[in-house]
Image (tube, rainbow, N blue to C red):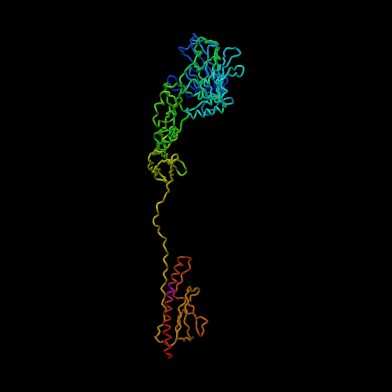
Amino acid sequence: TVVYKGDNVTVGTGNKTIGTNPDTQVVLDQFYKINKETLGEFLRLEYTGFQNSKYGNVDIGKILVSFSGWKPNYEKDTYDPSGIYFNNKLTDGFWYVHSDGVTVDITLYDKEGNLIDLKDGTAYITAGSLNSEGTGSKYIEKAEIINDKEHNEYGGSGLALPESTVKVHEGAGIYGGDVLYSEKNNEVLVIYGDVNDSTIRKQTQAAIKAWGDTETNRAIINKYINWDNSNDNKKEIFGAGLFKVHGNKIKIRFSTGIGSAWATYSTSIPKMTLDAVHPGKAPERPALKIEVEKKQIVLKKNSSVHIHYVDVYNDIQNGVTSGFDHVNLRHGTELGEHVQHIEHLAIDDEYQNTLWDWASAGYVLAEMYVPEALKGTIKDDPQHHYVYLTHNTAPEDRHMYVNQVIHYIYEDGTPAHEDYNGKTLHFVQTGTKDLVTGKITWDGEWTKTQTFVTVVSPVIEGYTADHLEVGPYYITVTNDNYGNNLDEEDTVVYRPNTTTPDPDPTPTPDPEPEPTPDPLPEEDEYPHQPEFDEEDEILTPHASTEPGKENKGTGTAKVAPVKAATVSDEAKTPETVSTTEGISDESTEVAEKSQNEETLPETGDKKAEAAGVLGALAATMGITGLGASRRRKASAKVNRKDKKNGK
């Protein structure tokens, strides 16, 4: 139970699982994030409910575990949060991640709540698997006992184990105690993965290069090759150390330069003899005491099982649907962060495994896994089993809504009628979502074409709409126009009707003045002449002799030239003949005013002038006809005279 957490600590998610046998498996299912560097106490846990835990003859009622001295370190991984994993079982320990280290205080209380004091020489704690790449490397796992030198209330000391590379070093500072770590590069003898002749030769050569090629070094290499992942627990001593502790609490600083380690409060001890550094007679056996005996501890060889998870989605897309083989055919991509390791179990031991919850990450089985991924028996060589996964999918819908609105306004923009809002059209498409990547493939069919029906514009008295109806509209949604605005918006404008007067009846045309008819020309009265006259006569038309009147006639008659003659007294001259001077012996041109032309009075009336023109035209035609008649008569008279004169 968490009884205290500092301001820089928040509850996180996730867990750490160590081992797979239900009887021995460790699941650290609580995680607390430490958000920044903290020197003092930042987290305190309380463990209760102990049934058979004792220190000597004293029953243990509760144990408090306090954490302090946190300094974030992301050397190994820059993505996971910095923090501590733990559970409700004290002996399962804790796993710290992304920190240079952490200091742990362990305090014991009896059933009555009294503090338990650990007597000197009665309690031992093993620090095992202290890997190191040697002096100067960041990867050196250390365990330091913290002493209260001022008050001597708690403390301890380190013990070197025979044949171990881990040595006791003096701690730094006034409160620092012994530090257990290896100056020698013992990591060079660790083999990760398969153990075979090739990997053994490789690590042997690496160790010789690091340590030097001597007989002693070769003997150490041959004996402790693969000591931390060994099939023989006897090799674990190569990286282990021991603390003898005393006082009212145990205070140890765990640290590593790469920022991650699992620490336990173990009472186990590697195979060893302590003749050289035996602390003395073994005391009574308290709950946290490690009994040291002068005898060889024989243990079975160890081996391991490893469960790998492989993503074969791309292979399936390329047509491979079964028979996956990651090792030989390079199928798929291994999900390295989810590999499960079942280690440090003796050969022939039974194991069980809880598979990773791949469904929570969006995966499904691509091929049934082998039974050994769940349970089996530890064999001589490390076993590797593969679980092949592919991406799970789920349907995903997307929607599009299309609206219609019609505005009815007058010419000035003011509303003429309430807007028409058509039924909203709803379109849906179903796609496929990849639950691993989150990518959605939109390959489904859209809802088929829908229609906005024809809308008749409302009638407004005295106005005419510029659109008597709107629509229909046929709406189709596709992947190409998805997301575009497909709404239909129209505006109908009403204009006032134009007033058209009744057409006028056919107007009565203005009366046209009746033209004054031209007077019929008066026939000239000529004296009867016999067919053969004795003498020539000159015929002249009558002319007006009334004083003060001007002859308006415009016609000009040309008279054929005649010889001058003496008119006798007996010749009849019309009263209207006027003599004209300038008659020569040879010819006479007489300008005659047409007697047949009637002149209209000048009234200024344009229509009268038009009538006068018509009359003049008629008179001219009459004069022309008269002239022709006279020429015939004159010609006849000349002929008669010529005959008379013998011509």
Q: How many marks?
A: 0
Q: Position of residue 260 (x, y in %)?
A: 53, 24
Q: Is residue 477 above or below residue 142?
A: below
**Span colored in magenta:** 618-623
The spot of residue 103 in percent (x, y) is 55, 19
* Name of the residue lying farthest toward the top: 57
Q: Magenta includes 91?
A: no
Residue 20 visible within the image: yes
Task: Report the front residue among 384 and 114.
Answer: 384
Q: Residue at x 47, y 69 (%)?
A: 601
Query: x, y (%) of residue 565?
Result: 48, 86
- Give the answer, above or below, for where 292 lies relative to 471: above
Quick check: can you spot residue 72? no
Q: Main secondary structure of the magenta part?
A: helix
In the depicted view, which residue is nearer to us: 466 or 510? 466
Closest to the observer: 572 or 585? 585
Position of residue 567 relative to residue 332, above or below, is below
Residue reaching furthest front?
215
Q: Position of residue 571 (x, y in %)?
A: 45, 85
Indicate whether 149 appears above or below 525. Answer: above
In this image, 259 relative to 510: left or right?
right
Q: From the image, which quarter does the C terminus lie in?
A: bottom left
Residue extending farthest to the right is 174
Residue 396's image quarter? top left
Residue at 46% of width from left, 86% of height from top?
569
